[in-house]
Image (cartoon, coloured by chain):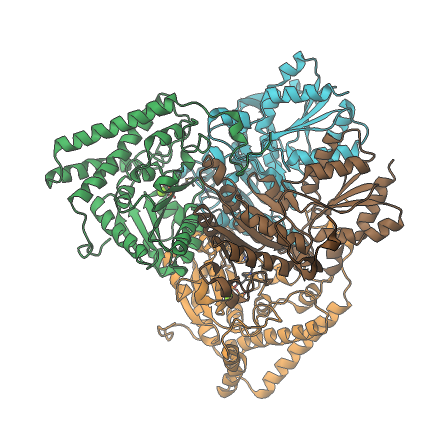
Chain colours: A brown, B cyan, C green, D orange
Amino acid sequence: MSTDTIEMKKTNGQQAINEALHEAFEADPKVILLGEDCGDKEGGGVTGVCKGLSTKFGDLRVRSTPIAEQSIMGAAIGAAMAGYKPVAEIMLMNFTTVCMDMIVNHAAKLRFMSGGQSQVPLVIRTLTGAGNQTAGQHADCYEAWFCHTAGIKVVFPTFPGDAKGLMLSAIQDPDPVIFIETGMTLFAPGEMPVNQGPIPLGVANVVVPGNDITIVSYGAQMYRVMMAMEELGKAGISAEVIDLRTISPWDRETVLASAEKTGRLLVVHEAGRNFGPGAEIAATAQEELFGKLKAPVGRLGAPYCAVPFAKKLEDSYLVQPADVVAEAQRLTAMG
Amino acid sequence: MSTDTIEMKKTNGQQAINEALHEAFEADPKVILLGEDCGDKEGGGVTGVCKGLSTKFGDLRVRSTPIAEQSIMGAAIGAAMAGYKPVAEIMLMNFTTVCMDMIVNHAAKLRFMSGGQSQVPLVIRTLTGAGNQTAGQHADCYEAWFCHTAGIKVVFPTFPGDAKGLMLSAIQDPDPVIFIETGMTLFAPGEMPVNQGPIPLGVANVVVPGNDITIVSYGAQMYRVMMAMEELGKAGISAEVIDLRTISPWDRETVLASAEKTGRLLVVHEAGRNFGPGAEIAATAQEELFGKLKAPVGRLGAPYCAVPFAKKLEDSYLVQPADVVAEAQRLTAMG
Amino acid sequence: MTETTSNRASPDAATQLDIYRRMLRIERNDDFTQQQIRRGRITAPYYSGRGQECIPAAISNLLDDDDKICTIYRGIHDMVAKDMPLKPLWAEIMGKVDGTCKGKGGPMHLTHPETGVMVTTGIVGSSMPIANGFGWASLLDGTKQVTIAYFGDGASNIGAFHESLNLASVWKLPVIFVCANNGYAEHTRFQDGTSVDQISKRAIGYGMPGYTVNGNDPVEMWQYANEAISRARAGEGPTLLECKTFRFCGHLLGDDNKYMSPGELDAAKADDPLPKYRQKLLDEGIATEAQLEDMKAAIEAEVQQAIDFAVESEFPPMDELRRDVFAKEISA
Amino acid sequence: MTETTSNRASPDAATQLDIYRRMLRIERNDDFTQQQIRRGRITAPYYSGRGQECIPAAISNLLDDDDKICTIYRGIHDMVAKDMPLKPLWAEIMGKVDGTCKGKGGPMHLTHPETGVMVTTGIVGSSMPIANGFGWASLLDGTKQVTIAYFGDGASNIGAFHESLNLASVWKLPVIFVCANNGYAEHTRFQDGTSVDQISKRAIGYGMPGYTVNGNDPVEMWQYANEAISRARAGEGPTLLECKTFRFCGHLLGDDNKYMSPGELDAAKADDPLPKYRQKLLDEGIATEAQLEDMKAAIEAEVQQAIDFAVESEFPPMDELRRDVFAKEISA
Ligand SMILES: Cc1ncc(C[n+]2csc(CCOP(=O)(O)OP(=O)(O)O)c2C)c(N)n1
Ligand SMILES: Cc1ncc(C[n+]2csc(CCOP(=O)(O)OP(=O)(O)O)c2C)c(N)n1
Ligand SMILES: [Mg+2]
Ligand SMILES: [Mg+2]
């Protein structure tokens, strides 16, 4: 499929997700939404992703809530079990910590514990990411927690078209999905097909083809990987870049096939390196490609500390393009 | 140090931890304790680990609480910052989900966010583990969540002496520690030195020396590994068994040295395999021992589902001794 | 409740008898459960609702199949009162494939949407936030369905209680919050964990009606439940009912009850609402001895059939671990 | 509060002047902060406490250095009122190594134990559970220290509020729960998220005194705070104070205020408590114009020195990422 046949338009993640929500609401009266400040009277959500929905679809389908995340998640779970398809906003990922019971012990498990009688077709939208000096309690990437929790899918889109397509799929998915947004992925300018449709969950995207090393990333970090491409090229490294898009279940086939082809694999995420998502990918790759890799699987992620406030510390906390280049060089030098 | 010179006594984990608490309370007036039903009037805790403490040290130092885990953790955090050394019980690990904010955004981060002004010398005791048909919300092993969270140590002892020694260290540690108990590790009969003293956090224990494969495990799962030893011996496999004891920070030196020696590594835990603690160990080993291992690092853990109720399903959910034998055989057959 | 209840509608004879039937069904089912536990046929922990029968019996009389309940580990009495069929219930608590959850949920997670048993949770407080979701769905659907959130006195101290009552009130949801105040949370006495003498007073903080009701008096229970359910159906929003009662078998079956005062349990048992209510029905000529004995025999037969059914049922196959994680079976 | 306050002690002239000094210190510091933001020297989000000065000013007059506060993202006014030194405060909000948190915490996590600023949290509701821990420590220590938990009206709807007030009451902790009800939670109006007209009514559900106070009236604020703090010091347990006020700069500096009614903000600003109180002090002869101008000059000099100090201060070195994770520096 070549992109020149597809009509594209300029947009960003915020507009793309907003468009997905409008289309989903239009197409399916069972789609509902709730979260703090999500109604238009309150501005349509802290990032404006919900703009226009309450005006168009009414205050009963689109509800602003008190600051009470357990009650937000509970209302979403109950409504989902009653046949609705709620999109629940937990304003920031750090605030999932006040409603983990609802997410983990209930949303993720009710289908299994009920032997399939209950279903919880629910999307949890949440925002995170460092880079705006919001410090230690507003910027953590805790997707690994949810990947480790059986029964919930984890989606973390990078580019606007993917954000729209994955949101459309997440809403129609019969199971709970946590859908992670960042300032970068919402507001970085981009483009997408005018008629962007659903994109299946669990399928990665080869963003840049290459031969020497496979670099897997997602979300805001993906932008910082892309910023490394020029330097990598200058260093004579042809990197195949894969956007994971869905972190759990992740697309083992695409990642492993690429790593087998290039012989090297580097996983880069904003989440902490220790016990992070990259560990699962590395552990899987060393198992499935034992003896076939030219270098160990590399992992780049945040250091083991809280997100620091001071701008320079925050910059150093994040995996920067230069770190990606250095690690790719180290790995390609290894044989 | 040979064990025959040490006077041993019969005990179990429950008594060992109870002894540690009594000694800590005796030695240090700053040690305090709280949790649901922890006072003697209420039975000294659901597993009896706190027995005798409130009677001996008073109701102000040892407090039963309402069912309100955020308030339990908050009270512990504040008291810790005020110079006390609280031991807070969150009855079951699944209930950490109602107080993750306090644990993750506060206990684990306050030292860092305050630039070292605040310290939170806190022990969170919690219980978990499958095997008693308590089903989907009472038996999860979520230690990986806490390992991924910067600023909190994760201790998961197996044998009584370690339970006592690690509890003594955890209480005196200047940082928050989550200390995980299971029915098996509390009530399986065992023995320990009469004068068991503190055991440093972060140090693994080689329980059985061996040559063909390194098996790393901890907690209740360790018992199921030990039950595999006879079969392994019959199969001609000499396994070196390492009890991790502290899962974060984990003892990389001991594990990697052993794996380098045996050439093979198998990590076994009750926690889910996907994005589980074993992934970090495998990812680290493939990196540090690249080209030196005779087989990929093996990982055994729970399947990707909630803990099932029916006894036979629950048995099959758990990693059984036979699974350990089969995986060790597969790996040793590999070269 | 101190205030007179005379201005509230009273249950007629048929209603009173129906409440008794539900109470008896709970009590007989509980008794048989305890027998099967002694025989080793049930190996899971059991949180008996014995002593608390009146509460769900009176409420369930007022509910239709499509009204919903969200209940807790101590909730089998709520389900039995709601006329959940006993065969899949028993098969479930024995961990069999014909169980309502195919043996995967067990007694703490019994679910039976056809009779409105939507969620059974083992996490204190968690029945309430989810009940609100069903309430929201009723508003969206435009039906008059109500949802009951059952929980204990101890649960009234946890955050989920607060968030749920606040949201239900702000959104005027058709949800009734039913607190079975049995005086204890595990081994902790009510007043040692709760800062208010009557949980119903907390309703003031949510701008909703709240009542403390004698949960062992079927007539009073029915009167207040009727008012609350009528309000909810009329779109007037939620109510908090604190129902005073006692659990006869302690927190968990096998409980040593050492945390109770001497004589406390005996006094409660001496005041057992079931025989008292039976006598009242006889005294008032609402039922005859023979009628009640027939009722009992029928219930016992139903329970016994359910047990036989459950014993016969198979254990679930191993690939159930891969099913119902997601809608689509996951690969091995 | 509707009830007469005449039976409560009143602040004397020195006290009234001290409250004014604290209010002015807050207001001047806020004004300078906004200037520095416009100059691009502070790049972090800023949650101004402008308009809410009276509350912490009156309370802090009654506190000693070793009394403690736990506050929130909108909390700099609470710290400035508590006489936290401005140099480390400014260095922190500029992310400098001489900041009280070495630049690692920033404005949302300012901490200064010497003046009792124990915790600043960005998670709604979380100041309260932790405040209880300091209260417990006071009981263990046998001191008369009190702890103030500051929070907003929106926070009164989250679970942590409920759990904290309940525990504080059951344990009779010397903690005062101070809710700054500024009418909004982010962009959501008080009544759209809160089920009760007065948050103070929730105190009934915790068996503790609760009052709704005019948080823009320094004298009334002081009277109720004095009563609450005295009760706490006397071992009589916690109090809930709901203090009605308004935030002049919206939720976050730069807020478009579109969610407010037209004129709402202007009306609040026209009723600015600071100039009103200033006039009162002059009218009642408590202070002279010259005195107040001197006070202002001194405060401005202090703030300017703090800014200069902060600007001069270095950025923290990279190895700070490895420090303070644990007591022992972690290896690279
Ligand atoms: C969040 C949470 N904390 C603790 C527990 C452990 N627990 C189970 S039941 C119970 C007591 C609940 O008491 P109450 O609400 O009065 O209900 P009752 O058991 O008396 O019916 C506790 C503490 C739990 N299940 N969930
Ligand atoms: C648990 C949690 N949920 C949501 C937020 C996002 N948030 C930050 S401030 C705020 C509004 C709080 O309102 P209020 O308590 O009235 O305090 P105010 O900001 O008015 O001072 C919200 C929703 C948060 N920080 N924490
Ligand atoms: Mg109870
Ligand atoms: Mg507010």
Drawn side of residue C111 relative to residue C4, left or right: right
Expressed as whole percent of the image width and height from the top left, the position of residue B317 reads: 55, 28
Expressed as whole percent of the image width and height from the top left, the position of residue A95 reads: 56, 53
Rendered image quadrant of residue A188: bottom right
Which residue lies most toward the front here?
A5
Establish if B261 lies above or below C176: above
Q: Quadrant of the N terminus of chain D?
A: bottom left
Residue B289 appearing in the image: yes
Q: Quadrant of the C terminus of chain D?
A: top right
Ligand 1: quadrant of the figure: top left
At a point 37% along the width and 25% down the height, the residue shown is C310
A43 or C224, which is in the foreground? Answer: A43
Establish if C83 lies above or below D174: above
Establish if A39 lies above or below B30: below
A193 or B189, which is in the foreground? Answer: A193
Rendered image quadrant of residue A296: top right
At a point 37% along the width and 22% down the height, the residue shown is C311
Drawn side of residue B300 relative to residue C8, left or right: right
Expressed as whole percent of the image width and height from the top left, the position of residue C115 reads: 34, 40
D145 or D134, which is in the foreground? Answer: D134
Expressed as whole percent of the image width and height from the top left, the position of residue A28 reads: 50, 53
Rendered image quadrant of residue B216: top right
Q: How many marks?
A: 0
Residue D100 appearing in the image: no
